Amino acid sequence: MPTTPAAPTESGPEPLDRLPGRQPAAAELARTAARRAGDLLAPPAPVRLGDVVPAPEQVTPDPAADFTLPADAVIRVSAAGRDVAEQLAEWLRPATGFPLPVADAPDADGPLALTLSEAALAAEGVADGLGDEGYRLDVTGSGVRITAATPAGLFHGAQTLRQLLPTTIESAAPVAEHWAVPGGTIVDRPRFPYRGAMLDVARHFFPVEDVLRVVDHLARYKLNHLHLHLTDDQGWRIAVDSWPRLAEVGGVTEVGGGPGGFYTQADYRRIVAYAARRHVTVVPEIDLPGHTNAALVAYPELAPGKVPPPPYTGTEVGFSYVDPADERTYAFVADVVGEVAALTPGPWLHLGGDEAFKVPADTYRAFVERAQALVAATGKTVVGWHQLASAGHVDGRVLQWWGTNGDDPETAAAVRRGARVILSPGNRVYLDMKYAADTPIGHDWAGLIDVRRAYDWDPGTHLTDVPAEAVLGVEAPLWTESVTTLAEVEFMLFPRLPAVAELGWSPRSTHDWDGFRERLAGHGPRWTAAGITFHPSPDVPWPATPTVPTQRTPDTTADSH
Ligand code: TNX
């Protein structure tokens, strides 16, 4: 809608500020007021090339080279990238209503081309190449080309392209829209190789379809690991053929007394395959030796004293453990990690290790060392909560930091012995923490975490005496004691998950709260269009909607950890 200032009644169409006797300041005010009124009615501002979350490494806009996707566009791709092209088409077809066929011959000129090429990357001017997840995206007047060395790189580039299209691209039904993409070039690759989120499916069980949707959310923001917390006191969620009662008996409870549930091996395979297609690696966690009440209900011979405990549906921690003095416990661990490893294509197996409060320190260490060896024997790399640090090293092992003070000599010592670290500081990225005191679900033991607090820290320097080179990446865990539905999962993930994704992906040089909150604001309407529930955090300047609260939460970002 036009935003020309209203012409003064007697003076004709001359610009207000050039009229004799008029104050330029008043004229400027009038013009601004008119522009504001226009803005209110105007469609959302066009997406700019730099509006991407997580922030790309290099963005070079060329406003003269904007491109509009035509209805007869064909996506051209080489054979190895075909599946990424098919997914891009699946994302774009519903809203555009365009057929978007996928065809071979990526080198032919066309409006959309995905090129897999090592050779092309050598010429891109990125010192050490785009690596196994980087991509280059070129938007010119004649089309969009994404170039990468791997399908994962193409996939991340395709997710970027999705964000560069108008918000309405998220619509599930065709929309009359000018499908413009801003011109220029993006060259992009991740800061850290491991970028993840954790879903606790043990405290409350979530059906396969919910997990798949969470995978989609991760993939949008270039997160590449989904950690599934599969076992805990309240439920055992993965079928194990050699110990069938684990799921059949241990799976039928959850916090609050609901029906629980478990994944059959076919369900789990479906999750890992769905994730793999989206370049997300599943990290299964079997929490040991504590957090095992559900296993003890199913197999009392694993319990110290051999007395079957009652099923547990509360939210306390630290009371249960498998009997470290019974050899059957180690047969159980070997069988379970063996089956889970065989079902899992990714390289990781998470052993838990947290809050085994009733196991004496030296017994705990000896147990963990045997369990780590059993995981290593499956060919997987051990991951565990940072409490594992006290046990001896095993090749490649990774400690997941969930403390709140940024300082742990035992973890630092384990790093000197060769461990790597995933950062999940409780007071920064625990997505089960409330945003504000009045958030209806969640905990607050690690503090209130609104978007700024989740965003404003540096994984490279967070832990005392742990150098950036030892940091494998970041992960945002979502514990589900109080989270019971997919909508509640999404409410806790959004908008904090994209903040964590940016910490994991974007170079530190792009870190900028003001810029981030502006870019993030543009995603609110996308989530709405996609049917994703989110918390309208007052930290973010959402485009005007009546649902946004105006009160700011107290600033909890004063300390550095
Ligand atoms: C601590 S973090 C736990 C979980 C709880 C969580 C709740 C960690 C390794 N253990 O068992 O669910 O706090 O915030």
Image (tube, grey):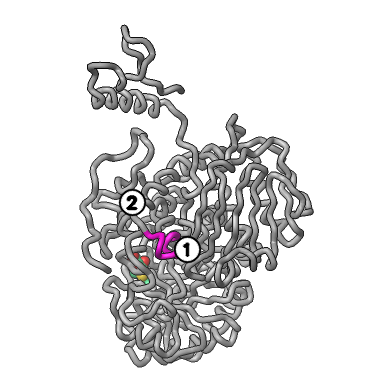
Which residue is nearer to you in this view: 270 or 39? 39
Mark 2 belongs to which amino acid? Asp
Percent position of residue 87, x then y: 65, 51
Residue range (magenta): 501-511
Percent position of residue 53, x then y: 46, 53
Q: Residue at x 40, y 85 (%)?
A: 415
In the rendered image, which residue does mark 2 sit on? Answer: 514
The answer, for residue 250, to whether it is visible in the render is no
Percent position of residue 18, x then y: 31, 20
Query: Is residue 508 shown in magenta?
Result: yes
Query: Which quadrant would residue 188 be assigned to in this image?
Result: bottom right
Mark 1 belongs to which amino acid? Trp
With respect to residue 136, does 179 lie above or below?
above
With respect to residue 285, does 376 lie above or below?
below
> Dot 2 surroundings within 10 Å: few (below 14), some, or many (20 or more)?
few
Number of callouts: 2
The answer, for residue 93, to whether it is visible in the render is yes
Magenta stretch: helix, strand or loop mostly? helix
Furthest residue toward right: 104
